[in-house]
């Protein structure tokens, strides 16, 4: 079991597009295990490799951690995922992020998506999902492309969280050689 440190806003891995995985090998499988161990330890619903400072297109989502029977089967690991369909119908709901732990805000996203990607076994899988599960998958997918949920905030929502966002940047400027907002 290897619990990794979650990087916070300002860390370059959160703003750079992650690299595609070219081969599923022991290193990639270890990253996946680290993501699972870290997510279980922290108690979040999803975690992407860039959030532990690894710029690879890998994420996990596990809504069963919500302890709600309706989400018990909603867990997945995706490598090199692609959103191949997004509904025009959207919904706004509150989101948070393990890389911006003290920030929550309203984000508008498509309510239904179809996503395809590789499983750790190397097989291609396509899933169609809606509602909260679709929201979590989109949130994690965004991490692989250098986007954060705060990028979707309305000006009012951003203003409400501005001080806390600035605090993350200020703290990271002390410890990181490169900061990407």
Image (spheres, rainbow, N blue to C red):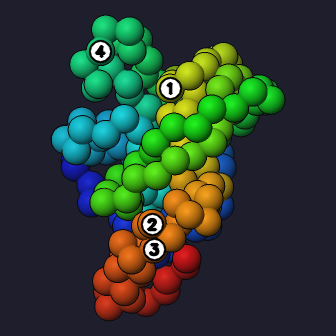
Can you identify the residue that label 4 sits on?
68
Within the image, what quadrant is residue 6 found in?
Answer: bottom left
Can you identify the residue that label 1 sits on?
132
Q: For the residues labelled 3 and 2, say whether their Cβ atoms are less than 8 Å apart.
A: yes
Q: Position of residue 76 (x, y in %)?
A: 47, 25
Mark 3 against mark 2, which lies toward the viewer? 2
Q: Residue 162 — which label?
A: 3
Q: Tell me the crowding category of disc 3: few under 14, some 14 to 19, or many 20 or more residues within 10 angstroms, Cα based.
A: few
Mark 4 against mark 3, which lies toward the viewer? 3
Whether residue 143 sits left or right of residue 73 in the image: it is right
Q: Tell me the crowding category of disc 1: few under 14, some 14 to 19, or many 20 or more residues within 10 angstroms, Cα based.
A: some
Tell me how far mark 1 sits from mark 3, CA to CA. Answer: 26 Å
Q: Position of residue 70 (x, y in %)?
A: 38, 9
Quadrant occupied by the N terminus: top left
Label 2 residue SS: helix
Can you identify the residue that label 2 sits on?
160
Tell me how far mark 3 sits from mark 2, CA to CA. Answer: 6 Å
Quadrant occupied by the C terminus: bottom right
Residue 38 appearing in the image: yes
Q: Residue 174 — which label?
A: none
Q: Earlier in the sequence, mark 2 or mark 1?
A: 1
């Amino acid at each position: 079991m290897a619990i990794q440190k979650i990087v916070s806003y300002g860390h370059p891995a959160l703003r750079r597009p992650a690299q595609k995985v070219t081969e599923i090998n022991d290193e990639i499988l270890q990253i996946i295990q680290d993501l699972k161990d870290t997510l279980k330890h922290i108690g979040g619903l999803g975690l992407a490799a860039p959030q532990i400072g690894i710029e690879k297109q890998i994420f996990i989502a596990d809504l069963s951690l919500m302890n709600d029977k309706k989400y018990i089967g909603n867990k997945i690991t995706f490598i090199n995922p692609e959103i191949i369909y997004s509904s025009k119908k959207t919904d706004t709901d509150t989101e948070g992020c393990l890389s911006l732990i003290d920030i929550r805000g309203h984000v508008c996203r498509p309510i239904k998506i179809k996503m395809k990607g590789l499983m750790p076994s190397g097989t291609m899988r396509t899933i169609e999902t809606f509602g909260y599960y679709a929201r979590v998958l989109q949130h994690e997918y965004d991490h692989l492309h250098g986007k954060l949920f705060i990028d979707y905030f309305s000006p009012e929502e951003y203003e409400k969280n501005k001080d806390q966002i600035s605090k993350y940047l200020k703290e990271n400027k002390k410890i990181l050689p490169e900061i990407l907002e």
